[in-house]
Image (cartoon, helix red, strand yellow):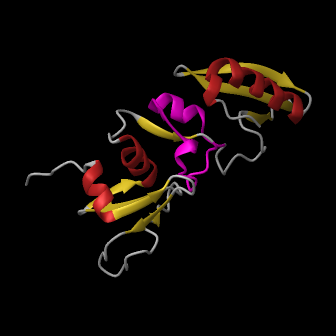
Amino acid sequence: MLVVALTQDRLKQVLHYDPETGVFTWKVRRGRQAAGKPAGRTHPHDGRVTIGVDGVSYYANVLAWLYVHGIFPEKDVDHRDGDPFNNRIANLRKCTHSQNQKNMRRHRDGASGPKGVYWAKGSRCWMSQIYADGKCHYLGLFATKEGAAKAYNDAALVHHGEFARFN
């Protein structure tokens, strides 16, 4: 089966994108979806919006890039603010997968709260660490959670630059 890549022209035939709101709406009736209705659904595992076009599912942030710039991004498209629903073009930027990982929010199971901060039972204090360049960098032990979080923030600025997400 031959799969033809989605083009900007085809995308604009079936969808309208508002770069100010980041919302896609259907231009044509698609199954049960009437023209003028919002397009897409929220993906349950990562919260990102997906939209099916011609039998293929795409992330809305990637479609926004194609809609505005006319090409599929070679790498990832990052949400600057980390909000997977915010597909305004001003909130999107091309990035590598590694850069996109640096901008991630802390995991929901992070019991301590701040990103990169953990309670070290044996030492009975707070430990801070950061992942960068494929390695875990130990930042030290701290008497307070706030001190450990500040150490992470300082290291994030150095290691992650514009893609840093702070506590």
- The residue nearer to you, when weighing 13 against 103, is 13
- The residue nearer to you, when weighing 19 against 73, is 19
In this rendering, the answer to whether 32 lies above or below 70 is below
Name the quadrant of the C terminus: top right
Q: Position of residue 13 (x, y in %)?
A: 28, 61
In this rendering, the answer to whether 16 lies above or below 165 is below
Q: Position of residue 110 (x, y in %)?
A: 70, 46
| Residue in view at x 58 percent, y 32 percent | 102
- Side of 125 relative to 166 (left or right): right
Q: Position of residue 56 (x, y in %)?
A: 27, 58
| Residue in view at x 44 percent, y 75 percent | 37
Outermost residue to the right: 143
| Residue in view at x 39 percent, y 51 percent | 63
Q: Which residues are magenta?
A: 81-105
Q: Is 67 in the magenta? A: no
| Residue in view at x 35 percent, y 54 percent | 58
- The residue nearer to you, when weighing 61 against 159, is 61
- Side of 101 relative to 76 (left or right): right
- Side of 37 relative to 158 (left or right): left
Residue 10: quadrant of the picture: bottom left
Q: Is 104 in the magenta? A: yes
